[in-house]
Amino acid sequence: MKDTEPSGTSITLRCPFCLTLNRIDLQRAGGRPKCGSCHRPILLDRPVKVAEEDFEQTVLGAEALVLVDFYADWCGPCKAMAPILDEIAKKGEGRLLVAKVDTDRAPELSQKLEIRGIPTLIAFRAGREVGRTVGFDPGEIQDLLERVS
């Protein structure tokens, strides 16, 4: 789905099926945006995986608020965080993007952003970090979202 007029909530995501980059207006996310190439749905009511090579364009280039979960598949607290992030993505659909970055597959990015422990959640707005929390603390996640919203 390609938009010609920026709305202040646009993001660029890679289609998980055909890997084409798509510009999407989050405010239209409820209408189930589709990939401009393969026409499969791009689901934004759940966290989306972002690879190291797409981070700058997807997260830092987003006009909307992006909450990024830096995690690893082997991490117990990261697994416990998953249902909370699912709920945040569902409730925030149309207003924010919840993204996930696997720190084992993105070592340079993790080092650059000084990820020292996981799970680490970082909120970005207009390419800048606006808040961060480390560890599994559901109350802290809510506080972070209230501070940056």
Image: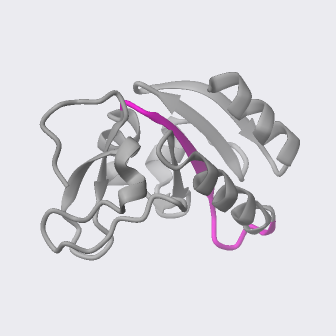
Numbered range of the magenta stretch: 63-76
Position in image of residue 33 (x %, y %):
30, 60
Quadrant location of residue 122? top right
The C terminus lies in which quarter of the figure?
A: top right
Location of the N terminus (image quadrant) = bottom left
Residue 27 in the image: above or below residue 36: above
**Relative vertical location of residue 40 with respect to residue 99 in this rendering, above or below:** below
Q: Residue at x 29, y 30 (%)?
A: 7
Q: Is residue 51 visible?
A: no
- Residue at point 39% right, 44% down? 26
Q: Residue at x 84, y 48 (%)?
A: 138
For residue 71: magenta?
Answer: yes
Give the side of residue 103 with respect to residue 108, left or right.
Answer: right
Give the percent coordinates (x, y) of residue 57: 29, 41
Magenta-colored stretch includes residue 102: no
93 left or right of 19 in image: right
Q: Quadrant of residue 30?
A: bottom left
Tally of numbered tags: 0
